[in-house]
Amino acid sequence: MRLKLLFCVVLFAGIAPAMAQNAPARPKITGISHIAIYTSNAAATDHFYRAIIGAVKRPDPEDPQGVRYMLSSTQFIEVLPLPANAGIVRLDHTAWNTTNAEAMRRYLAARGWKTPARVEQGSDGSRWFEVRDPEGNKVQFVQPGAENVSAPHAIGHHIIHLGFMVHNRANEDTFYRGLLGFRPYWFGGMHDDRIDWVAQQVPNGHDWVEYMITPGGPGIPAGMTQQHLGVMDHFSIGEVSVPDAYKLLASENRLTGRHDAAPKIGRDGKYQFNLYDPDGIRIEMMNFQPTEKPCCSPFTAASPVD
């Protein structure tokens, strides 16, 4: 019996590495692809993203009803018509660039995550698929196409983070950190003794997702306004100098609509300036590098660069 047991242990020890070798490896997640949002006023939204943000408008290979506002060849804001049942929600999905969409789909499927049967392909050569994270947020993985886009008037060309409402940090971490390999970057709050924001950086780049911690759930808390939800559902454009970018917007008369009175240094020690699109989605211009020591947590990974 002991010899038989020893034989089984040795056999399993030989099989286990082979099984691990046969399991699909996770392809690289290099950064943010895009954020997809809804509009209730296409003309006003078009003016905001073209005239104020300075993005370049392109057709949407993923959805013929949508449009893309490009900041670079690989990063954009996707704008979709407002669904009839959207309520106060203006965020449709977030999306991350990967080196191989099909390999990412197989990787997640092999680990028991619900995935579609195949990836989609756009007219620009991009490939993508969509899943849900533990709180039901739609997440896409995109293998970029070969389209070359220049946006010379954009106030910035690099989306450095995406943020959205999160109720349970530990549950979200099972997906973003456990499955996808995101790394801790920073956490902090309005006060030193609480955590309101948790930043998790992609495994193969410097962009990050920001959990906007909102206790309770699931779903949207009772009494939450569209304006409050839009503060949480946001994206950030990186800047070498937010004060200089702010001065440029002001000098070119591009500061219309709702926005902060002036740039300020956030709790993470970085200059920032908030603008809001016509439906209340927050666009946070943020310095790539901190100016002051952050509160609450040190940075535990490298900050992004232009």
Image: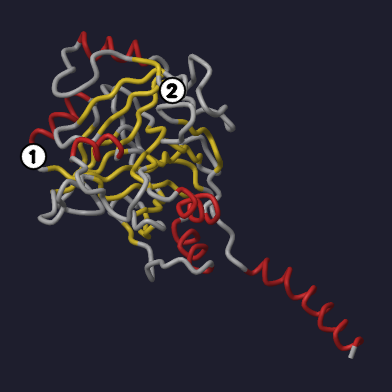
Give SS at disc 2: loop
Q: Is residue 243 left or right of residue 9?
A: left
Give SS at disc 1: loop
Residue nearest the observer in this picture, 119 or 244: 244
Residue 57 horizontal/vertical position (percent)? 20, 36
Residue for badge 2: 267
Q: Is residue 277 left or right of residue 184?
A: left
Q: How is the image coloured?
A: secondary structure
The quarter in which the C terminus is drawn is: top left
Residue 169 horizontal/vertical position (percent)? 46, 48
Residue nearest the observer in this picture, 76 or 269: 269
Instruction: Give the crowd class for mark 1: few <14, some 14-19, many >=20 residues within 10 Å.
Output: few
Q: Is residue 119 above or below residue 3?
A: above
Q: Is residue 147 left or right of residue 10?
A: left
Q: Amino acid at mark 1?
A: Asn
Place residue 264 in its image quadrant. Answer: top left
Residue for badge 1: 41
Residue nearest the observer in this picture, 239 or 8: 8
Residue depicted at 33% across the width and 24% down the height: 285
Residue depicted at 25% across the width and 43% down the height: 78
Residue 164 horizontal/vertical position (percent)? 34, 43
* CA distance for labels 1 and 2: 33 Å
Q: Earlier in the sequence, mark 1 or mark 2?
A: 1
Residue 40 horizontal/vertical position (percent)? 10, 43
Residue nearest the observer in this picture, 171 or 224: 224
Q: Amino acid at mark 2?
A: Arg
Instruction: Give the crowd class for mark 2: few <14, some 14-19, many >=20 residues within 10 Å.
Output: some
Place residue 151 in its image quadrant. Answer: top left
Question: Farthest residue toward the right?
Answer: 3
